[in-house]
Amino acid sequence: MPACGPVDARLLIVGLAPGLHGANRTGVPFTGDASGDWLFAALEQFQLTSQCRITNAVKCLPPANLPNKTELRRCSAYLQEEILRHQQNPGPVLVVLGGVAHKAVLRAMGHTAGDFPFYHGASTELGGMKIFASYHCSRYNTQTGRLTRDMFNGVFGEVSTVINQWQICHHPD
């Protein structure tokens, strides 16, 4: 599954893998399912829709919706290429959705989970990028209350602030 959005986007979002009834069916990450509804609502609320590119740690639908180490290794080169390209953009910001995607991003960047531990709302700077972590907006996480809209929007509110501050500092009128 290819990434979607402009390659020069300020924001790169990395999810886990195509969803069975969403992206696997539509061919576009985070479209056609509840996860996408949450993600696109947050992007619209914070006016980030035109500034983002979306990809996944794994390019194809994994069995039981959880990729194994072999699948993650096979797709790592694609993710690494996407991240390297994103690092060349001005003021790059990256959001990882979920612990598995978080680990995959760190591995693709030559880091370990110890370099940037995963927890919802975590943020750091690595490789010239500001990186934010959120629980994945999967139906499981949202229906069990592990992730609420306020929590999710909190992360994207911070992302929006970082992007807007960078734009003010680098594009004064």
Image (tube, grey):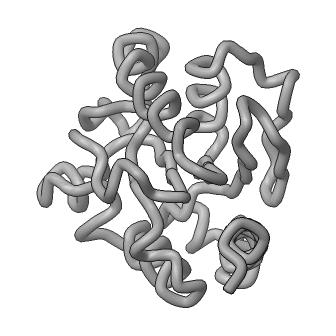
Q: Locate residue 173, reporting x and y percent.
A: 67, 86
Task: Look at the image and tell me in which quarter the N terminus lies.
Answer: top left
Is 147 placed above or below 104 here?
Answer: below
Residue at horizontal 58%, vertical 71%? 142
Residue at horizontal 59%, vertical 85%? 46
Is 72 placed above or below 100 here?
Answer: above
Residue at horizontal 59%, vertical 51%? 90
Q: Is residue 74 visible?
A: yes
Residue 5 is left or right of residue 155, and the answer is left
Q: Locate residue 40, reporting x and y percent.
A: 43, 77
Q: Nearer the viewer, residue 46 or 24?
A: 46
Q: Locate residue 32, reporting x and y percent.
A: 23, 70
Residue 110: name its quadrant.
top right
Residue at horizontal 62%, vertical 18%? 107
Residue 113 is left or right of residue 3, and the answer is right
Q: Is residue 93 visible?
A: no
Q: Nearer the viewer, residue 137 or 45?
A: 45
Q: Locate residue 143, reporting x and y percent.
A: 57, 73
Question: How many marks on residues?
Answer: 0
Residue 86 is left or right of residue 92, and the answer is left
Is 97 placed above or below 101 here?
Answer: below
Residue 29: name its quadrant.
bottom left
Q: Nearer the viewer, residue 101 or 93?
A: 93
Residue 36 is left or right of residue 128, and the answer is left
Is 31 placed above or below 5 here?
Answer: below
